[in-house]
Amino acid sequence: MRYRLLGQTGLRVSELFLGAMAFGRQSGGASPGESRRMLERYADAGGNVLDTAVNYQDGESESILGELVEGRRDRFVLATKYTCTRDATDLNAAGSHRKNLMLSLETSLRRLRTDYIDLYWVHVWDRHTPVEETMRALDDAVRAGKILYVGISDAPAWLVSHANTLAEWRGWTPFAGLQVPYNLLKRDIERELLPMADAFGMSVATWSPLAHGVLSGRFTGEGSVGSRESAAASAVHEVADELGASPAQVAIAWVRERSSMVHPIVGASNVKQLEDNLGAVDVQLPEEAVRRLAGAVEFDVGFPADFIDEASRSVFGVDLPNLDGRSGNRW
């Protein structure tokens, strides 16, 4: 396992994050014993980022993690999230406003048996809370020492840009990380979110790299998936056979290849699945395989990116291909 810096901070984070969404049996997840085995295997591989949320498994995920890291908590980068409801009968028990932030944070600290969170994520954009309130409340928690770094999940690029610009102007803590879905079948983030993260120097934690199991070969029965899914799964299987790797490893490796900013979140319900996923760090995809996988399913980046690409030579001149641009990323 290799390490990178989180956004524009000095925090060292492993190239794969461990998703603890399945830690707990409230929604058919892993038992505490299996969760322990997964954590130990991930740590043995050199992983150090544990990603959970206040609402995962109705809180059991955080509680299990708190027990598992007790006595060695500082060796891990603990990441959790707030915004999702803690009580569906109380409107103020959800959202990105100051009250829910404070109560969610205290709940997470108690369950995780720690006095600080390394990386605190806004779980999803709350349209009903001014972003100024969210950013100031997060910064207050950072200044109080309860949070070290902040990130945002599942939000539009314009909002994240607005929030980080506000933080820069007002001396608040900016978002160092972005958490979004990304896989061969869901490449929407290449339109705005990945370029935005690149511009702000943000790390990108990507969930569902296996497209809910479709790209791992889990669904192979006739009619179990659609034509797009079948095409992507077939391409992944083909490359996997050529490289002597598993489909899951190839699918995760493709996500890693897209940008040095990207950290796939590997989530599993047992050690066997996790072991397979962790093997993705040893898979080196040839350039031709990367292109073949990307071309297996049609993807249209859309306006304005496609228009700008098409018009580039007429706008910037015929020598544009000789220019080494600022970004070496693939979108």
Image (tube, rainbow, N blue to C red):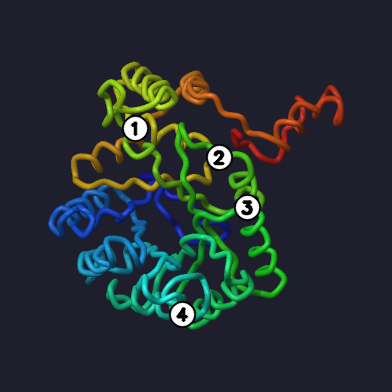
N-terminal-most mark, 3 or 1: 3
Which residue type carries mark 4?
A: Gly
Q: Amino acid at mark 3?
A: Ala
Lateral position of residue 233 relative to residue 4, left or right: left
* Residue 188 numbered tag: 2
Percent across and percent down for residue 210 are 36, 37
Quarter assignment of residue 127? bottom right
Element assignment for label 2: helix
Q: Earlier in the sequence, mark 1 or mark 2?
A: 2
* Residue visible at 49% across and 49% down in the picture: 180
Residue in the image at 62% along x and 48% along y: 198
Residue 261, percent from left and from top: 53, 46
The answer to which image quadrant residue 318 occupies is top right
The mark closer to the camera, 4 or 1, is 1
Q: Nearer the viewer, residue 84 or 313?
A: 84
Alpha-carbon distance for marks 3 and 1?
A: 27 Å
Residue marked by disc 3: 157
Report x, y in % for residue 203.
52, 52
What label does residue 145 carry, if any? 4
Q: Is residue 220 above or below residue 157?
A: above
| Badge 4 density bin: few <14, some 14–19, many ≥20, Cα 10 Å | few
